[in-house]
Image: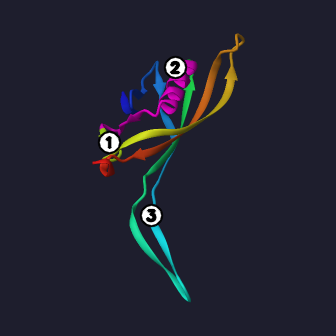
Amino acid sequence: MQIGSIGDIPFIVSHDYMLTFHDYSRSGSSRWVKHDLIGRKPILEFIGPDVEKISMKIQLRSDHGISPEMELKHLRKMRDEGKVFPFILGGTPVSNEYWVLESIGEDVSYWRANGKILSVTVDVSLQEYSTKGAE
């Protein structure tokens, strides 16, 4: 059963294959400019919303039908090439904008005797990619 995707990486849970995430966190903020005034407090001016950010952990385990090395290579390529992609959860886009893979961190838990990764947890940071200002 597919629960979502980031670009062409599907999050799927079945009896012989599992690629999903945990520790999902989303944050957003607004943007303000501070105008300094002589002898008075500064005046704040709202200039608009900032981009949203999402972080999550993805566990890649070979005993779940995943090739950790191949999935890591795919995630690194998305990050290094600046791929822009939709983020879908439950069949619905997470926002009206696309996303980029801002950073990944890799924590290898177990190795096979041949030096291949058995299990790795990947910390993924996504950032919203707005196209509205480019028109």
Q: Nearer the viewer, residue 65 or 97?
A: 97
- Label 1 belongs to which residue? 93
Q: Which residues are drawn in magenta?
A: 66-91
Asked if 69 appears above or below 32 in the picture, the reply is above
Q: Nearer the viewer, residue 133 or 12?
A: 133
Q: Residue furthest right?
A: 113
Query: What x and y, as percent, mark residue 48?
Result: 38, 63
Instruction: Point out the tag, 1 or 2, that comes first from the N-terminus.
Output: 2
Residues at marks 3 and 2 touching, judged by CB atoms closer than 8 Å:
no
Q: Is 79 part of what is drawn in magenta?
A: yes
Q: CA distance from mark 3 to mark 2?
A: 40 Å
Task: Give the side of residue 96 with respect to residue 73, left or right.
Answer: left
Which mark identifies residue 66?
Answer: 2
Secondary structure found at label 3? strand
Query: What x and y, as percent, mark residue 73?
Result: 54, 22
- Residue at 52% x, 19% y: name it: 66
Query: What x and y, as percent, mark residue 34?
Result: 49, 73
Q: Amino acid at mark 2?
A: Ile
- Label 3 belongs to which residue? 31
Instruction: Point out the tag, 3 or 2, that comes first from the N-terminus.
Output: 3
Q: CA distance from mark 1 to mark 2?
A: 25 Å
